[in-house]
């Protein structure tokens, strides 16, 4: 009995920490629709800055400690403010999710800035004055600081509720959450509203990080370790609902505290299991509302995709010709790098197929890539299958997952859909990670080398080039087939598409499966190319890579993902090898610069320039 | 406490410059011997920045004496960011484009295994410095891979020897949820039960790596009322675990046996909160007064104005063992190098070490002692050096663990 009480308290304490971070994210998303990847970085910065300030002010005095914590939160708020003004404000009009690319650039930069400023060693923060000790609860010691956190969560929740419901500013923010354009039309200064919301959200992240000082080590992994969970809390709670975020944080915190008593190994995947269950039962989270149709209509109007002109076809053929003769000009390593780029291109194109024409953004596309790789590797390891069979088994396994996961996912929309794909990807990842007997766990499966006839680097390159080109072209043909038009109809107006007899859910499901199969083939090729398969192939970072490639190229163009994959992967390889130190800072800055220079993605912006010079093929309102 | 970044940067800038400038001219003359070194620099900087310093120190010492085989050695470092697939790409680039003579490095076990498999496929020597997994030399061992650091099995065996001396009968284990943590727990249970059949294991906790929910984990362990605790968490997880455990009194009246906690990388951040009385493996850097270590310690301090971490020792010893192998083989021919590596004896910062011919594992050991706090810092007391050679299974057992083809 006392264990139940204590574990509940433990769960509530974790919930409060999580809530502080997630509430800021929720507010920012609710108003600006920015999927702010850098929120975890703000959290980390909050912890680091608080550590420095508290060390300087002296942690013994209450003023030194709490003053340091609050000042750190404010400073992080200012950093957020700066990023909003300098970066995000310029790209609010960009396609959906494009801001994610920009915030990812910020994540990379902050990682290196933190390393350079605070060094690599973990930092242990001081305990909070007055809350150093413990109270006895049924003979169990419970830290007073944790009790403080338990109380603080609801206090912050209450304060935010008052702010949003009892002040004019809060009313405007809520209005903007519901209908951004209408608020603008009524003469409210949106810029100021957005900036202030971003400031508040960043402050909360900073505060969340600073308040971790007495309970957690400050380290360079804080940013990425919190961000996925913060998103889960926001989505489980319901986008933009702060109360929902609190409920979700409590649900996750308490489930976790009890989960580890029963299944100690469930730690890897528990939050994602909870999210999957909640989203399947309640597609808009615990407290979320179905987005109004007005808003759906207002947020996005995609430019029409047009089949390649003669000019573009020639350009494509020329690029292909260059790729075909490249091995004659490049050394061994150049060929391997090209092989990797070609495979990643297929991976990016497969994501684009559902994301662009289908409007089904996925945060977990690596699941199908990874399952493809595992399909090939498992066939090679357990069935001693030859490469050809492995390459067939790869899309089979990925496609099967696409059928099952897709069935659930396509019933959702927008960020909820994206987060459910993430949940499934994490579940698949944890199976690969935990089922050691079958998959070798995190030590992976080794010795997945190609058949002797394809073992040569150049031969394998041509194999990958032929397969990937064929599939990318096939995807392109599908986009301009009746199926592709139906898919786009479902994206642009589900209601009208249903009215003319299209089964939008089934069409989306099919698109999902096709994308999964294509990603699976890319994964299979990747497995034989690398010779080994690891759970990292399905990790969040791989999914993010795919997203970045598509967004960088331009989600609303057909050739965007190809250009994006080449640009992103090549840039990264080049920087890692060329700079060695602080390559993340340079890569992050490069992404930010690219984002500002090409706000529609590389290809999207280039097309627009061309369109402008040719007296405008692209309708003006399409790229608002 | 902070590392001298200027020195680190200067060192690496020099290395990069060397890599850029080195080029074909020298190679054509049969110039420098090139080593390709791959590690997770951006993912694990706390261990790897000191590691690279140690490596650079050894490299400069060797080259100052004229190098090996009358040729200088140069290193080309690559950052895999903690991803095995990237490490394979770098390995390919180092071998094919940079024409390195051999590969080295690796921190994470899966990265080590990926490079090892690449090395096997491409018939290239790979000297793994840090990856701890037993699989690297046993279940997935191969002809081309050698490993310097004492493995998971060896570290646990050293601790079991101490744990078996205690009166503790009931144990609880806490380990990060991945292969390293699971293997440590598996070996601890197996070896301790063999040594003391009457022990029992009453609880296990496997927090996700880097994401421990310390309060709940401590409470779950407390609820099982064990007499002793076996801890495998490290880095940030360890700090959070120790802090919650201290506040909640988890460690009071209990014996705690803990892997790696005495290494400065993990002990120093704990400061005055370092848990007294824990039995740990580690590296009491300022107390070791053997001639080999003093020479290393002083040179390191003079060069980097900082004390060495365990990573520094690993980097230093890896580089030195490669030089010793080159000298013994008299060539960079990889097959001959492998013959030389098998049974290679060299002097590490901890004293004489041998790469065993039977499984390519080095006999580098570790220090075992109890933790204490002195002047607000965690230290190891009553420590002694455990020679790795004594903490490995018998040759017959090893032969069954390793593929016959390796």
Image (spheres, coloured by chain):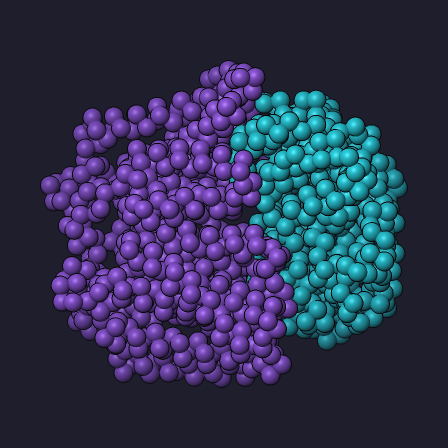
Left or right of B63? Residue A616 is: left
Q: In this picture, is B370 found above or below A360? A: above
**Residue A526 in view (yes/no):** no
Q: Residue B327 is drawn in which quadrant? A: bottom right
Residue displayed at 56% across by 44% down: A265
Left or right of B335? Residue B88 is: left
**Residue B252 in view (yes/no):** yes
Residue displayed at 88% across by 39% down: B290
Return the x and y of residue A36 as percentages of the image width and height: 36, 46
Q: In this picture, is A18 found above or below A370? A: above
Residue toward you, A126 or A216 = A216
Position of the N terminus of chain B, as image quadrant, is top right
Q: In this picture, is A530 found above or below B212? A: below
Position of the C terminus of chain B, as image quadrant, is bottom right
Residue displayed at 53% across by 38% down: A262
Q: In this picture, is A375 found above or below A42? A: below
Q: Residue A77 is drawn in which quadrant? A: top left
Return the x and y of residue B330 as percentages of the image width and height: 86, 68
Residue displayed at 44% across by 33% down: A254
Left or right of A250? Residue A611 is: left
Q: How many marks?
A: 0
Return the x and y of residue B31 as percentages of the image width and height: 76, 70
Q: Which shade of the palette goes to chain A?
A: purple
Return the x and y of residue B11 as percentages of the image width and height: 67, 51
Q: Residue furthest left?
A: A186
Residue toward you, A39 or B406 = B406
Q: Which shade of the palette goes to chain B?
A: cyan
């Amino acid at each position: 009995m006392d264990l139940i009480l204590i574990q509940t308290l433990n769960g509530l304490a974790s919930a409060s920490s999580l809530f502080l971070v997630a509430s800021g994210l929720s507010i920012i998303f609710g108003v600006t629709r920015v999927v702010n990847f850098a929120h975890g970085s703000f959290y980390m910065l909050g912890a680091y800055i608080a550590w420095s300030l508290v060390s300087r002010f002296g942690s013994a005095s209450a003023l030194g400690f709490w003053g340091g914590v609050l000042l750190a939160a404010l400073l992080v708020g200012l950093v957020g403010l700066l990023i909003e003004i300098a970066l995000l404000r310029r790209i609010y009009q960009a396609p959906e999710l494009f801001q994610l690319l920009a915030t990812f650039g910020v994540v990379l930069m902050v990682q290196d800035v933190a390393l350079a400023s605070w060094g690599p060693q973990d930092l242990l923060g001081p305990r909070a004055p007055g809350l150093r000790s413990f109270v006895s609860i049924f003979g169990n010691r419970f830290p007073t600081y944790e009790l403080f956190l338990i109380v603080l969560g609801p206090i912050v929740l209450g304060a935010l509720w008052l702010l949003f419901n009892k002040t004019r500013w809060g009313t405007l923010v809520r209005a903007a959450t519901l209908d951004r354009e209408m608020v603008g039309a009524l003469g409210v200064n949106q810029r100021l509203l957005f900036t202030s919301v971003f400031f508040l959200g960043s402050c909360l992240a900073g505060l969340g990080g600073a308040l971790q000082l007495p309970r957690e080590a400050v380290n360079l992994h804080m940013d990425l370790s919190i961000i996925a969970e913060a998103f889960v809390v926001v989505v489980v709670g319901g986008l933009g609902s702060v109360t929902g975020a609190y409920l979700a944080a409590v649900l996750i915190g308490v489930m976790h505290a009890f989960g580890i008593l029963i299944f100690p190994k469930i730690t890897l995947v528990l939050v994602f299991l909870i999210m999957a269950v909640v989203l399947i039962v309640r597609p808009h989270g615990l407290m979320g509302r179905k987005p109004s149709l007005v808003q759906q209509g207002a947020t996005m109007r995609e430019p029409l995709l047009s089949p390649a002109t003669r000019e573009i076809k020639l350009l494509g053929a020329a690029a292909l010709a260059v790729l075909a003769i490249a091995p004659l000009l490049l050394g061994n390593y150049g060929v391997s790098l090209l092989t990797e780029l070609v495979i990643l291109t297929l991976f990016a194109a497969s994501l684009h197929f559902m994301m662009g024409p289908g409007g089904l953004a996925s945060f977990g596309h690596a699941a199908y890539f990874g399952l493809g790789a595992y399909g090939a590797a498992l066939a090679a390891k357990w069935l001693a299958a030859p490469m050809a069979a492995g390459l067939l088994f790869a899309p089979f396994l990925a496609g099967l997952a696409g059928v099952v996961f897709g069935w659930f996912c396509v019933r959702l929309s927008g960020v909820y859909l994206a987060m459910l794909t993430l949940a499934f990807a994490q579940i698949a990842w944890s199976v690969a990670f935990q089922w050691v007997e079958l998959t070798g766990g995190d030590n992976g499966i080794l010795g997945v080398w190609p058949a002797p006839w394809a073992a040569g680097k150049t031969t394998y390159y041509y194999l990958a080039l032929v397969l990937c080109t064929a599939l990318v072209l096939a995807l392109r043909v599908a986009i301009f087939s009746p199926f592709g038009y139906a898919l786009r109809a479902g994206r642009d107006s589900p209601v009208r598409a249903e009215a003319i007899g299209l089964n939008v859910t089934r069409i989306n499901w099919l698109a999902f499966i096709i994308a999964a199969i294509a990603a699976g083939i890319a994964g299979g090729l990747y497995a034989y190319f690398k010779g080994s398969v690891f759970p990292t192939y399905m990790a969040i970072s791989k999914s993010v890579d795919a997203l970045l490639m598509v967004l960088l190229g331009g989600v609303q163009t057909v050739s965007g993902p190809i250009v994006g994959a080449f640009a992103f992967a090549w840039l990264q390889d080049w920087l890692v090898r060329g700079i060695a130190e602080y390559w993340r800072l340079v890569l992050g800055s490069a992404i930010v610069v690219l984002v500002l220079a090409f706000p529609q993605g590389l290809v999207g912006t280039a097309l627009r320039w061309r369109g402008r010079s040719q007296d405008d093929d692209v309708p003006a309102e399409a790229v608002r | 406490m902070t590392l001298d970044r200027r020195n680190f940067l200067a060192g690496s800038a020099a290395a990069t410059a060397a890599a850029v400038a080195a080029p074909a001219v020298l190679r054509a003359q049969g110039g420098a011997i090139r080593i390709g070194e791959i590690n997770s620099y951006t993912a694990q900087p706390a261990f790897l920045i000191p590691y690279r310093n140690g490596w650079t120190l050894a490299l400069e010492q060797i080259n100052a004496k004229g190098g090996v085989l009358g040729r200088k050695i140069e290193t080309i470092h690559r950052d895999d960011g903690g991803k095995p697939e990237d490490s394979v790409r770098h390995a390919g680039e180092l071998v094919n484009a940079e024409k390195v003579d051999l590969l080295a490095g690796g921190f994470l076990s899966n990265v080590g295994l990926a490079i090892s498999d690449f090395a096997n496929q491409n018939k290239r020597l790979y000297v793994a410095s840090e990856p701890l997994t037993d699989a690297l030399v046993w279940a997935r061992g191969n002809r081309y891979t050698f490993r310097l650091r004492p493995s998971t099995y060896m570290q646990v065996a050293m601790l079991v020897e101490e744990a078996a001396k205690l009166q503790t009968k009931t144990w609880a284990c806490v380990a990060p949820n991945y292969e390293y943590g699971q293997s440590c727990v598996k070996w601890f249970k197996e070896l301790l039960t063999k040594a003391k059949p009457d022990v029992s294991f009453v609880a296990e906790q496997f927090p996700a790596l880097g994401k421990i929910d310390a309060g709940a984990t401590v409470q779950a362990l407390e609820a099982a009322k064990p007499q002793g605790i076996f801890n495998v968490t490290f880095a940030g997880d360890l700090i959070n675990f120790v802090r919650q455990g201290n506040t909640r009194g988890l460690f009071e009246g209990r014996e705690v046996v803990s892997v790696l906690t005495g290494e400065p990388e993990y002990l120093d951040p704990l400061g005055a909160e370092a848990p007294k009385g824990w039995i740990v493996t580690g590296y009491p850097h300022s107390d070791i007064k053997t001639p080999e270590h003093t020479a290393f310690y002083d040179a390191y301090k003079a060069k980097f104005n900082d004390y060495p971490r365990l990573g520094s020792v690993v980097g230093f010893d890896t580089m030195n063992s490669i030089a010793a192998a080159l000298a013994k083989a008299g060539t960079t021919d990889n097959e001959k190098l492998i013959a030389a590596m098998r049974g290679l004896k060299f002097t590490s910062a901890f004293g004489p070490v041998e790469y065993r011919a039977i499984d390519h594992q080095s006999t580098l050991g570790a220090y075992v002692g109890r933790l204490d706090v002195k002047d607000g810092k965690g230290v190891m007391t009553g420590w002694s050096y455990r020679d790795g050679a004594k903490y490995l299974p018998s040759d017959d057992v090893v032969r069954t663990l390793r593929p016959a083809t390796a």
